[in-house]
Image (spheres, rainbow, N blue to C red):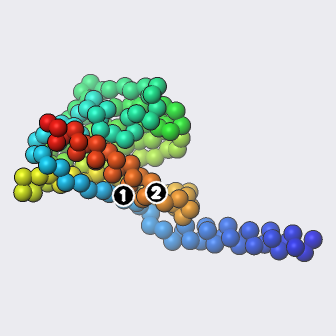
């Protein structure tokens, strides 16, 4: 009986330690990746600014072959929207373009409905440098306590960052093909 109580006490301490550690995490998160694309910003901008073009490069578009897409009217520029519903690998959500000054930036409200609820910002910035364009893809938003707990055991920066790296590499291939 003493061994069982000791094990339960250790488990309780571990859980309390995890919760205490999670409480020290920031109330907001930001994940960001960059790539240099050998194309002008004016070539890259439409790939981001028009949700119908995301099928050409987004790492999320082909995970579920039965993904249901609903494009707004418009699907591009400020006010453009896109909703998706798919299996557990992509869940469901909606994106709305908030800002889109060509060819420098596209700021998007990103809402997740399934498998978890979230309301974040996706932000793409394009800076031309010596005939090429530095493209940044960032996502940021609030980090509620349960997300802090989950991020204590799951490396979201690596997981989401890998997706961003894949998407940016796909975007590079599309833009450089012309």
Q: Residue at x 30, y 26 (%)?
A: 72
* SS under mark 1: strand
Q: Position of residue 173 (x, y in %)?
A: 23, 42
Relative to 26, does residue 131 appear above or below in the rendering? above
Answer with the quarter of the image where residue 46 lies.
top left
Instruction: Check residue 31 in the rendering and tell me which mark sits there, or answer none.
Output: 1
Q: Residues within 10 Å of mark 2 (few under 14, many from 20)?
A: some
Q: Position of residue 27 (x, y in %)?
A: 44, 63
Left or right of 61: which side holds 97? left
Position of the C terminus, as image quadrant, is top left
Relative to 47, does residue 162 appear above or below in the rendering? below
Q: Position of residue 39 (x, y in %)?
A: 12, 45
Q: Is residue 2 visible?
A: yes
Q: Position of residue 19 (x, y in %)?
A: 61, 67
Position of the N terminus, as image quadrant, is bottom right
Left or right of 60: which side holds 175? left
Dot 1 or dot 2: first in sequence order is: 1
Residues at marks 1 and 2, CA–CA distance in whole angstroms: 8 Å
Instruction: Check residue 132 in the rendering and tell me which mark sits there, or answer none.
Output: none
In front: 83, or 166?
Answer: 166
């Amino acid at each position: 009986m003493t061994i069982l109580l000791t094990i339960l006490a250790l488990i309780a301490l571990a859980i309390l330690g995890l919760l205490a550690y999670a409480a020290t995490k920031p109330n907001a998160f930001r994940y960001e990746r960059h790539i240099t694309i050998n194309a002008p910003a004016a070539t890259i901008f439409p790939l981001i600014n028009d949700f119908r073009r995301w099928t050409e490069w987004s790492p999320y578009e082909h995970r579920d072959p039965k993904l249901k897409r609903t494009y707004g009217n418009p699907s591009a520029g400020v006010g453009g929207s896109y909703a998706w519903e798919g299996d557990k690998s992509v869940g469901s959500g909606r994106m709305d373009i908030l800002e889109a000054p060509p060819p420098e930036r596209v700021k998007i409200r990103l809402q997740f409905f399934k498998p978890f609820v979230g309301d974040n910002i996706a932000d793409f910035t394009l800076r031309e440098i010596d005939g090429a364009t530095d493209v940044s893809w960032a996502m940021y938003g609030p980090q509620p306590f349960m997300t802090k707990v989950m991020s204590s055991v799951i490396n979201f920066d690596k997981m989401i960052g890998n997706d961003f790296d894949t998407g940016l590499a796909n975007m590079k291939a599309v833009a450089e093909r012309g």
